Image (tube, rainbow, N blue to C red):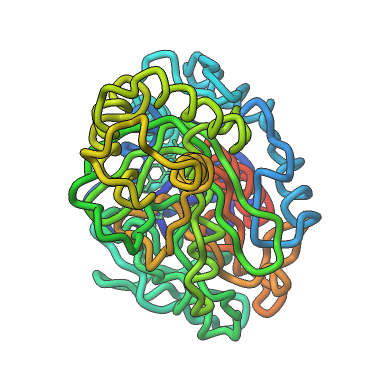
Amino acid sequence: MSGKIVVVVGGGAAGLMAALAASEHGAQVILLEKNPRVGKKLLATGNGRCNYTNEDLKLAHFHGSDPNFIRTILSRFSGAQTLQYFYQLGVEPVTEEAGKVFPASGQASSILDVLRHQAEYQGVALVSNTTAKRVDKNGSSFTVYTSVGSFIAEAVILATGGKAGPQFGCSGDGYALAARWGHKLIEPFPALVQLRLKAPFLKAAAGVKVQGRAEVYHEADRPSQAEGELLFTNYGISGPPILAVSRAASEALSRGHQPALKLNLLPRQQPDEVASYLQDRFRRLSHKTAELSLVGFINKRLIIILLKEAGIELKLPAGKISLAQIKRLAALLTSWVFTVVGTNGWTAAQVTAGGLDHRQICPRTLQSKLVPGLYFAGELIDVDGDCGGYNLQWAWSSGYTAGVFAAL
Ligand SMILES: Cc1cc2nc3c(=O)[nH]c(=O)nc-3n(C[C@H](O)[C@H](O)[C@H](O)COP(=O)(O)OP(=O)(O)OC[C@H]3O[C@@H](n4cnc5c(N)ncnc54)[C@H](O)[C@@H]3O)c2cc1C
């Protein structure tokens, strides 16, 4: 038992795990949280069900930092250890599509509750309504100055999250706390977020849900792509595939570019197959107008929009639609290109891409290379994951690592 005093700043997923790991390794732990209660964001995760890890933790699902840095931390507290850890606290895992793991209770509050109960059981002091303002060091002793007074510690773990979700208490405080010590920032940008598009018909399409593939083209990179349900909105587009490709779009926007989003509403067919299907269909339904001839094939609210985009008169008899018009419509259905003009920003983003530069952080212990005794965990570091439990896994793995080494 070290009996060392460790102050954890931030009571989110990473901070709670760091506090528990440090306490388990003998430290006396004080956790400071600016909100009235810890874990506010955790309650919102997974649509209130908390997708707390994934069965497939391939490195390709993580982004930002050096893959070796991420691999080292994930191996310190793996997916299997995460499942075991929560199982011991009483959480029965249920695996859903794409390896996503949720608590059997179907409640995100279960994850928060077991962590809080365990913190209480291990004697971790949870101090809420307390905002850390500055961290100073004198010899080997730290002073954490807060909105309500100061706390002395032998090690400090910063786990204040990034900028995603200011409504949950995250507005990038940790960047300023660390910058004071010379820690550099990889410019953060919102990820897992809805996209704003430039198109004249967004209001008319708002609310339409269609299955399809989304692709974002960004510079010379391979496109980022995902399939699933797309949801048109009055500002642009949402839905799981959009969140999945939003990182590439948001990164391009953060560099001053306007990336292109390509939607394929018929991803199983080639454009020429779609064209010959349409040709056949218009022949078969030649007595109907162009508009009515597409009812039953395309979402009703998209018909007018697509016909206008393809330059086809709505009232034109289907039998009179030219081959060039058919080809234009087939091209739109398989490759509808939009300009992305923005994202829905930090309030809507599920995660922060970018963050504290991992090159100034020891990959083995998550201790600052600039300030011995100062550690980092969670979204604050320049690591982010795909949708599917990867971000919380990063929070658990990095929180555990920082907690163990801070306690030594
Ligand atoms: C709506 C939503 C749904 C999500 N769903 C999932 C999901 O199902 N699965 C998944 O893997 N990921 C999900 N995520 C992402 C995941 O929640 C985060 O990546 C993860 O919570 C980050 O953990 P963290 O501890 O690093 O930061 P946070 O959880 O952001 O916690 C940081 C904490 O620090 C506190 N804090 C900040 N500054 C200070 C300060 N100066 N002093 C004291 N306290 C401070 C904040 O109030 C906050 O409580 C979701 C995110 C959102 C917004």
Q: As displayed, is residue 60 above or below residue 47?
A: below
In which quarter of the view is residue 338 placed?
bottom left
Left or right, 72 with respect to 62, comes to: right
In which quarter of the view is residue 396 placed?
top right
Residue 95 position in % (x across, y down): 55, 17
Closest to the observer, 48 or 129: 48
Q: Quadrant of the N terminus?
A: top right
Residue in the picture at 32% in, 72% down: 146
In which quarter of the view is residue 320 placed?
top left
Residue 205 position in % (x across, y down): 24, 44
Residue in the picture at 24% in, 41% down: 314
Residue in the picture at 72% in, 49% down: 73
Residue in the picture at 61% in, 45% down: 400
Q: Residue furthest right?
A: 68
Residue 270 position in % (x across, y down): 63, 34
Question: Taking the image as drawn, is residue 60 in sight?
Answer: yes
Q: Quadrant of the C terminus?
A: bottom right
